[in-house]
Image (cartoon, helix red, strand yellow):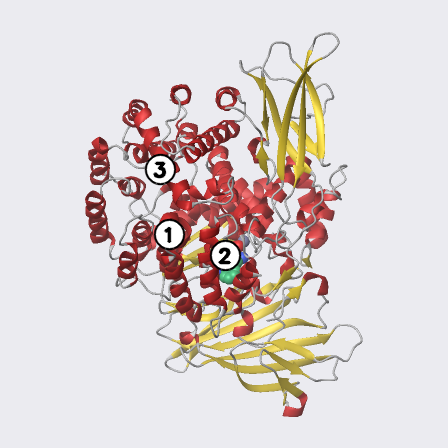
Amino acid sequence: VQAKRRADYQPPAFSIATVDLHITLHPTETKVVSTLAIARNGAHNAPLVLDGDGLELNAIAVNGEALSEEFYTLGDNTLSINSELDTFELVITTTIAPEHNKALEGLYLSGGAYCTQCEAEGFRRITYFMDRPDVLSVYTVTVVADKSIPMLLANGNPVDKGDIGASSHFVKWHDPHPKPCYLFALVAGDFDLLTDSYTTSSGKEVALELYVDKGKKSQGVFALESLKRAMKWDEDVFGLEYDLDIYMIVAVDFFNMGAMENKGLNVFNSKFVLADQESATDDDFFNVESVIAHEYFHNWTGNRVTCRDWFQLSLKEGLTVFRDQQFSADMTSALSNRIKHVRVMREHQFAEDASAMSHPIRPEEVIEMNNFYTVTVYDKGAEVIRMFHTLLGPDGFRRGMDEYFKRHDGQAVTCDDFISAMQSATDLDLTQFARWYSQSGTPVISVEHKIQNDDNDDVIHTFTLSQHTPATSDQSEKESLYIPVNIEIIDDEGNTYTDNESMIQNGMVILNAPSMSFTVNAENASLTPVVLGNFSAPAKVENPLDTASLLTIFKYAKDPFNRWDAMQTLYDRCIKQIEDAPGCAISNDIWEGIKQAIAQEQSNLELLGECLVTPSFETLCQSRSNINVSALSKARKAFCDQFAQALEQELLQVFNNIDAASYSYTQDAVNQRRCKNVVLAHLARLPQHEGAIVAQFDAADNMTDTLGALRSAQHCNSATFDTLMARFEATWNHDPLVLDKWFALHATQNRDDIFATITMLCEHPQFAMSNPNRVRSVIGSFAFYNSERFHALDGSGYKFVTDYLLKLDAVNPQVAARIVTPLTQWQGFANEHQVLMKQQLGRLLNHKGLSKDVFEKVSKSLA
Ligand code: HT7
Ligand code: ZN
């Protein structure tokens, strides 16, 4: 299997100014007639090489004449046209079978509706084409289908429609904006339609259309409202308006990822569109709004300005994630958003960087592009954009963005082009900063604090920050990064201090060398450095603070994020203590400190709720090596049990003080429910509070509280859990999206009969291996989040997942390659685990017919 390298980029040998597609839909014999206006780029005599995958070629014509066989070559995945003409019209006719397409790339059937997914390289499964993002064309698309399929959609604006004979009809679409083929989309089906409109800031009226499954109309209202909020926000914050007459969103049930930003015709996983109080949690509402916004924001960052090649994916994804994060922070709350995203970084991105899949946000080498839609490219990519924002300030960042669009609207460009636009908006030299694009790995910032008396008997505190990026699987040598480090120096009464050298500017120092120092004079004060506030860079921190200092930070740090973070570190320390001395009791001082923290934040339920969340198993893994899963899980559980016992009264008081108001999706109400459910999950560890869980389940008027009760019941005796789960299933059996929550809860249970349970789930009438949402809920949840059973030392969890992946890979390699991730991340675990994990990876690697998706990840992992 051949890898592609970023360094090997060559501009396209031909351009394709216009694409005219005539597509006659049929489940097993869809006809695609593609008419291309081809022009040779420069003087060369290379053939025109088109990509194609799984296509039946019916005819080729050049300038209206059928092309005889000596003028073209059909390879495994290419069609080469040997023409000496510099410009010509090429017509290619192919046949495809959407019904047989279970990989959900190209044109496929999702529950009876035709839909497409072309990013990254799916267009080649529809017709022969130069399937690369730097070939931009104007598309005209005619969709023909039986009249039993009433809605025929494609990109751009509708320009014609009519009947063809008695039983067929067509709609013709024209998209005036040149685009790469990965943004092509077609949808055809029978949907319920929600309509609305939006008037842009310059007065242009845009029709908004949201297509959902029949009967689901009321569940689409929130998505449509979110879209209007996103359109307004992009005008207010970035001055960006929508550019077509119509914006369509279609929700489909079979989808490999979250959603897709096809020009003017977004296709969404229905999970990120449908939401109402009964069936969706607060998190679901949040996700709907942020994914709707993300895809809308791509219209400028991705579509108007697109990527030159797929190595530049972070150009559009990192930037668009940053934009959706800023939007969500403005719509909801900056604090809970920041915490949410930092959790993702620590749980998933740090793990990726520590594995054999480590890559820079702009990868150098790729076998299967679908494998690089990663937390590194997306989320670390967004953190890098955030650092631009931090360094340039909001105004400087906006100037850089304006310049980016001015220079590159309508082009396919690189991350370097983005950096250069940002450089034009600042006096800072961004040369070293650009290393974030090429260097993989998680930098570690170490903090050293020395105290000396000088000649005048003044007390001088010297703080030294050092950076070190451990070698990663893809790069052994690392260089110093340019790291903006937010910093606060406080004493144990909450006073803040400045440094003698004025290196701290606006609460930030720049660490751009292996180490740097500054000094602070403080008489009679014990100082605490709060480092990397607000997670100002995607790094780890080693700051040897004692528990008293962590509690000081909680009490006095200015930034609430830092206060949350201090509590997380404190919990991590406590769990470490129990790991080192199983059975030990956490000291009373700590419980007293936490009690004071709870008392201090009684009226700030948002911060309180987040501070009462103990670090997940996955986060704990990132501050440990040589992990014995059972020992770490036991230590975490012991800490949580002690937490519940020691703080029972305080937790109860918080719980009882939160009114069970009737449901509304407002930030205050979300904070209340979040805090109440976090507390309930702690109380669930004490049998005397089982009644509160059942009571909440019985009384809930919304999915957040229902699910909160069910999650808490995971800590109760299994009969209670089983009873509530059975009741939930009976209520929601008709709605697979809701049932996904039930699937996931079952799959993450730590119980002896887990494999029988999962086998039963896979036989459930609502389960289908062909539906990625179902597979992620059952098998994905088990592999990613049932740490004790997945990592069982008899190897049964690893084997179970591998057995499943071997079957799944034949159906949907993209999803299989995602779910194999936890198996490939063996590096942090103790040797007993590693041996067993590698055994299963070996089985996968030896499997005949393994997809290149899974092959890439497994072979790297075993290299
Ligand atoms: N740009 C979209 C990526 C995407 C995708 C990639 C590979 C395979 C299937 C896919 N579906 C969507 C999503 C986004 O980031 O907005
Ligand atoms: Zn995106």
The residue lying at 37 percent from left, 66 percent from top is 770
* 766 shown above or below 516: below
Name the N-terminal-most of marks 1 and 2: 1
* 656 shown above or below 725: above
Instruction: Tell which residue pokes out farthest to the top in this image.
Output: 456
Pointer 2 local density, CA inside 10 Å: few below 14, some 14–19, many at least 20: many
Q: Is residue 679 left or right of residue 39?
A: left
Identify the residue position indicated by label 3 in the image: 637
The residue lying at 68 percent from left, 76 percent from top is 38
Identify the residue position indicated by label 2 in the image: 824
- The Cα–Cα distance between marks 1 and 2, rounded to whole angstroms, is 16 Å
Amino acid type, callout 1: Ala
Name the N-terminal-most of marks 2 and 3: 3
Name the N-terminal-most of marks 1 and 3: 3
Q: Position of residue 382 (x, y in %)?
A: 58, 45
* 774 shown above or below 51: above
- Count of picture labels: 3
Give the numbered dot on residue 792: 1
Viewer-nearest residue: 254 or 821: 821
Query: Which quadrant of the figure has residue 85?
Result: bottom right
Nearer mark to the viewer, of 1 and 3: 1
Viewer-nearest residue: 608 or 525: 525
Residue 201 visible within the image: no
Q: Is residue 813 left or right of residue 512?
A: left
- Quadrant containing the N terminus is bottom right
Amino acid type, callout 2: Thr
- Quadrant containing the C terminus is bottom right
Q: Are marks 2 and 3 in contact (CB under 8 Å)?
A: no
Q: Position of residue 318 (x, y in %)?
A: 59, 49
Viewer-nearest residue: 576 or 491: 576
Q: Is mark 2 within 8 Å of ligand 1?
A: no
